Every structure is written in C-alpha cells, then in structure tokens.
Image (cartoon, helix red, strand yellow):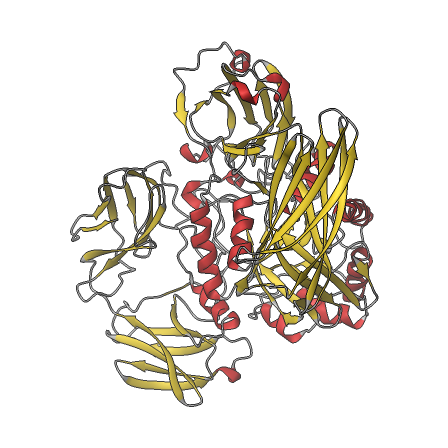
Amino acid sequence: MKLKQLLLIVICSTFLSAYSSNKTESRKRINFNSDWKFLLEDKKEFCSEEYDDSSWRTINLPHDWSVEAEFSKENSGRNAWLPGGIAWYRKTFELPANYDGKNIEIQFDGIYKNASIWVNNHPVGQQHDGYTSFYFEISELLKFGESNTIAVRVDNSVQPNCRWYSGSGIYRNTWLTISNKTHVATWGTFISTPSIDKEKAHVEIITTIKNLDVKKNLNLETVIYDPQGNKVISSSSEIEMERYRDTDIKQELVIPNPQLWELEDTKLYTAISIITSDKGIEDEYKTTFGVREITFDAEKGFFLNGKNMKMKGICLHHEAGSLGAAVPKAVWRRRLLKLKSIGCNAIRTAHNPTSVEFLDLCDELGLLVMDEFVDKWENPYKKPTDKKDPFFDVPFADQHFSSEWKKNFGQTIRRDRNHPSVIIWSVGNENHAPGSAEENHGMKKYGAFVRSIDPTRPVISGMERGRDKAVADKVNDIIETCEYMDLIALNYGEQWCKLIADKKPGKAYVSTESYVYFNSALEKRFANIERSPWLDVLDNDNNMGLFLWVGIDYLGESKSWPHLGSTSGLLTAAGFRKNSSYLYEAFWSDKPMVHLEVYERDADDFSKTGRWGWPQMNEKWNFPKDSVLDVVTYTNCETVDLYLNNKKLGSQKLADFPNWIVKWRKISHKAGTLRAVGKINGKVVCESELHTTSKAHHIILNSDLQNPKANDLVHIEISLSDKKGNRVSIDDKELQFELEGDGEIIALDNGDNSNSYLFRNKKSRSTHKGRCLCIVKLGSNRTQKLKLTVSGNDLKASSIAF
C-alpha cells in the first residue's frame, strides 16, 4: 500500500476463504461437527482416551452452553447474567487405513475460551483467545483403521472476562482436513490486483506451499475461472522444494475484461491451485475471489471501483439473542438482508473476528467489512483510585493478549484477507486516548505487523475519544496518533471532522463508532444534540462514513438486572425493525418512504432516553380519548401530509427540519386511523398508517422460506392481529408452540432484552409489542410436511406447513 499526502489508494482483489476441492483424493475437508460428547464438569481424567464418556450428553456442534443456563443476578451483567464454567467435549472417530501417511489437521473456527486439545492422550496445544480461528497438525498422533479420541477442555470459569456476552464452548464449526504431505498451507493463498481497468486486471498470487516430505521437484499451476465457470487464464511455476520446508511462490496473471465485485453485483472468480510432482497431483486448493479497487482519498473519502460512496455502517456483535454465540449461517443471512433493506452497506465486526460464514455472506450480499481483531489490548478504563464498580472491576482485556496477539492477528489476517468484502483492518477498540504514549506505541507496533502480512488495506483502531478538553488540543492529539494509522479513525468524534480536515492530515476520516440519535458538541461529549452523526458524514466530503452503535440489540454489557443487554440497535435481537431503523432508512435508502411513530411523552423530553438510546415512542394509536400527543414522521420525501380519519391535519416540508426529524405537536387523539402521506413533486409516493386496534383475536404466521429443503433453517415471524387484520402491539400474549414432523424448534425470541426468560424453553414464549420469532431446523426426512402450530389463550390458533 502506498501512502501519499492527500491520497491513500488501495487497489486490490480479495477473496472468499480458501476451501479445498472435494473432487480428488489429494485433499478432503470434512465437517467435524457431529456426534460429540459434552459434560459441564472438570476432571483431569477427561483427557484420557480410555475414559468412558457413554453417559455424557451427545451433541452436534456448534454449541454454546451458557445460553442454555438460567439467568441470575449473581452472575455478571457483562455476560448477560449467564454463567460460564469449565466443560469438556470429546469425540471418538475412525480414519481409514489409507489415510496413514497423509497430513491431517484439526481446525476450530471458534472456542470460547482457554481451549486445550488432546488427541489419543497426547496434548496438542492451547488457544486462549475465544474469537480467533486456529488449527493443529495431528498426523503422527492418530491411529488408522481403529478408534481415535479427541478431547477438548474449555475454561470460561473466570467471569466476567469480556465486555459483552461471549458464549461458552465450541460455538463455531470444526473441520478435519486430509491432504498429502506436500500441500498448500491452510489459508495459504493471497491474491491481489496491483492494477485494474476496463480491459484487464493484473493479478498477483502468492501461494504458500508446505513440503513435509523428501526433497522433490514440483509444479504449481494456478487456473482462474470467471463467475460463469469459464476458464480465463492459468500460470505455471517450477519449484525445487527442500524437505520439511515452506516456500512462497509468486505468480502474475492478467484477467481480460474483468467482472468487478460491486455491492449490487457481487461477481466472484475462482482460482484453483494445483501442485504436481512426478507422483502426480499432490494437492488442489480452491480460492474464490472478487476483483475490486478500493481508494481512500483525503478530500473525497471512499471509492469502490472508482465510484465515490459513503459507508452506511453499523457495528455488530457475534451472538444472536436466544441462540447465543452458536449462530447458524441462515440466521445471519436473514439479519444481514434486513439491514441491507434499510440501506446499510457496511459492517464493523465489533470487537473481534467474526465467523467465516459471516464474511462469505458479506461477499455474496455486497457488504463492506471493517475486520476487527480485538477489543482491549489491556484494561485502561479503571484506575486503582477509582471506586469499586462490579462492571469495571474485572479487566476487559484478555490476560493472554500480550503473549498471543501476534499469532491471533496473523491467523485472522491470513484467514480473511481473501474476502472482497473486507476493506479495513482494525487492531483494537477504545484502548487509550488520542495523543497518549500508550495509544501511539500500540498503533505503531500493531499496525506495522498487520501491514507486514497484508499491505493492501488500511490499518486503523477504533480509537477512544478521550475526555473533554480544549478543542484545538483534542484535534492535534487525534492527528498525532493517526500518524500511525492509515485513516483518521475515531469513536464518537465526528463533530471534529471538519476541524481535522482543515489541518490537512492527508487521510480520509471514518467514524468507527457513532450514536444512533444524539450528537456531541465540540467542547462536550454528552451534549444530547438532537442530530444524527450521519449528517456530519453528509456535511463533510472527507468523512467516508460511520458505524452506528449498534446494528442489532445484543446480549451483555448490562449494568441493570434483569436487562439482558443493549437496546440501541436498529433491529431487535429477534431481527424485528425498531423505530430507529426508519430514520436510517430515510437517510440511506433511495426508495421513497415515510413512517409514523407516537411519542410516549413530550417530543423534546429526553430524560428517559439514555446516551445511546432513542426517545420513547411506539407504533400505536390506542390512547385515552382526547389525549394530546406528539407525533414524528421519518421520511426522505419532500413533504408529508398528516391525516386523522381522512381529515387533513397539516403539511410539513422535510427541508424545514435540518435533522430530518419531522415532529407534529399536540395532536388530539380520536380513535381510528392516523395516516402520513409522503409526496415528491406534489405526487403521492408512499404512506404510513397507525390504527386504533381492538384486542388480539388471532395469530398470523409468516415464513421466510416457501419451499425449504432438508436440513434448512426456517424463520417464522409471529404477530398478533385484531379481527380487522391490524397488528396488535398493546395486548401481548403468552404463546404455545407445537411442531409435528421431522424437525426441531431451535429458538424462540421476542426481541425483548428487558426480560430474563429461559432461552432453553422451546415450548412457549410471550410476544413483545405483538411479535415473536420461531426458528425451526428441518430434519433430513422430507417425505412428509412439517407443521408448526402456534396458540394462546383467547386467540384463534394458526398453523403453517413446510
């Protein structure tokens, strides 16, 4: 990556995670998730191959044991009032005799945390950090044609050890890879494009080959296929490999008329790396990639393939409500599609590496990613002189960070650098204040290491804003520390963006974390200015975008029992849209829209809002007769007309509201329908209505899949309706769920983070604001329909079959 005073250009092509081809015997990648034994207990004999685990619970991975437990105020709110503990996983398996002499690796995509691995009584290794993917080569420890045992001890007993809910256990996928002794290393390809134009893309491929065999002569052929599966070009290299050595082979190719990876058209190429020797094919390794150019301009912000765009971003944690940390890919697909429908185009993986499947979805769906490695390097928030506080008393940082960071950062970069969606690396979050020696030293050290592995993307940190101080000093401090970053990156500091630009630092600005509703003053952080930080992005060309805190409500980081976690998301934990999502749809979407909400109190009363919150309001029109109410419309239309029972109450222009929050004051309530009509050039283009509803009468079920296949996940959204078909949000009910056929309910969630109901209860759940979510996993037998019936007292039951 080459830095200039006013321009940082990163031209690269990146890729989906490399997966081996299953079409030949040279390499197999086996899903290793099924038939594990689990026990939430700790004894030293559990690592023994001879130990009898027949009485243990049989499970399939991924698995999070904490989410199965009961909530208790005796636990930490940082972990959503759920316990940790120590548990063991064991798996017995056989490998065929013809695997003897192969290279065999066990890979864990995520174990939280302090994992220790044994194979056939042999200690293999440890991984302390719970978010980093890792693998071990175990060939010599295995037996072929007979039984093997792998044992995994997971220690999440010291609580809390994370700022938010972490989950516990082997919560991501596990893989067994079998290859020849001469093979492409795991995560061993790195493909970039030094230059791209309409006629051609110059491709540079670095392939790491491992030779755990005798000295031999090899040929590496890399073949590239276009998104339609047509062979485009290939390159071959001759290599003389010494025994037990690794080597990097660089190849350069040219793709004619490249099909670019765009946010709305995610074209993906495939590279097949083929290693041959005089014995034949040694290995075949598949890498899926996208050709794209990213540019970060100090004055104009971000460009994708030459197109200037703003990052409409949100921060996301790794868990998913009642599913905990073990989140299926289909759940992330639904969530990301909901965010994308609002207009979101960027994700910050706050504050740890996400799953491979998550990044695959971002590649497929067209979402930009800030890939973050860690939250804290150390624990800067609490000083020895501070008063006791159960939330802050236990450090946020991992005690093993200083000894493990280099390995963890390196493995994450190699795993993720081939995703076209990943455009920025972040080495931390809110560690030290701008201008501090600690922040400067950390950014210099961690940034240099990241660039040594991947020089094609900018390196930043979500920098701590720091305490209020003289504005000029603050701006100078920010610029000083960002000398060690490739962008000006700061949490909650967009109010200084213009002042920073005036100093000509030679780098674009990115708001790595922002409030959803309020803004800060230059001199004061918590000023409660009713103006979204997004408007600072629009007002400053050098500000390339923001990442809201937060995209979806999450578990943990709670200071008040029984609240389970954050409620500042655009979506609930169940994936239902919240009032905040509609303002951001107005900001981010080109589709005309208008949305109505009614304030619970005076529209300018923020006493109950909280610093990261939203004014209290609801989508309802059920109030005592002649109540006087304040109403808001969120819109991207030129004007909005408001009607009550078809009587026009008034008309307002969006241009008269610089903060885009169109308030209507002192509306006298009358039962019926409140309707907002959005207009552009005097023509009606959209509407939003609120109805006075009667009590809940029946249940409505909507499935996200109409023709699911075996083993699919289906999301069923449940809503309460009155006799007229209006959604009822004021009369919540306890619902019962019954499933008939080959399948299981894996989660029930109403999105209410203020209610500590048991997540492991899959039989009943109350609605929240008239809604609930049921997630069903289909079995392998599809000869008969699966039927879900949802019922409740005084409600007409409803069923859905699939």
Q: Residue most toward the bottom?
A: 682
Instruction: Count up the numbered dots.
Output: 0
Q: Residue at x 72, y 46 (%)?
A: 236
Residue 290 location (% of width, % of height): 61, 57
Q: Nearer the viewer, residue 692 or 686?
A: 686
Residue 103 locus on image (x, y percent): 63, 26
Residue for point 52% across, 12% down: 49
Up-down: is 503 above or below 368?
A: below
- Along the line of sight, the residue nearer the viewer: 550 or 72: 550
- Left/right of residue 668 with respect to residue 132 in the rendered view: left
Residue pictured at 69% horizontal, 73% vertical: 541
The N terminus, quarter of image: bottom right
- Residue 279 in the image: above or below residue 736: above
Left or right of 481 on screen, residue 158? left
Any part of residue 608 in sight: no
Counting from the top left corner in percent of width and height, residue 679 is at 41, 84
Would you say residue 761 is visible in this rendering? yes
For residue 465, side relative to residue 739 (left or right):
right
- Of all residues, the one furthest to the top in this rendering is 50
Q: Observer-nearest residue: 690 or 425? A: 425
Image position, residue 550 (x, y; %): 53, 55
Determine whether, in the image, residue 741 is placed left or right of residue 430: left
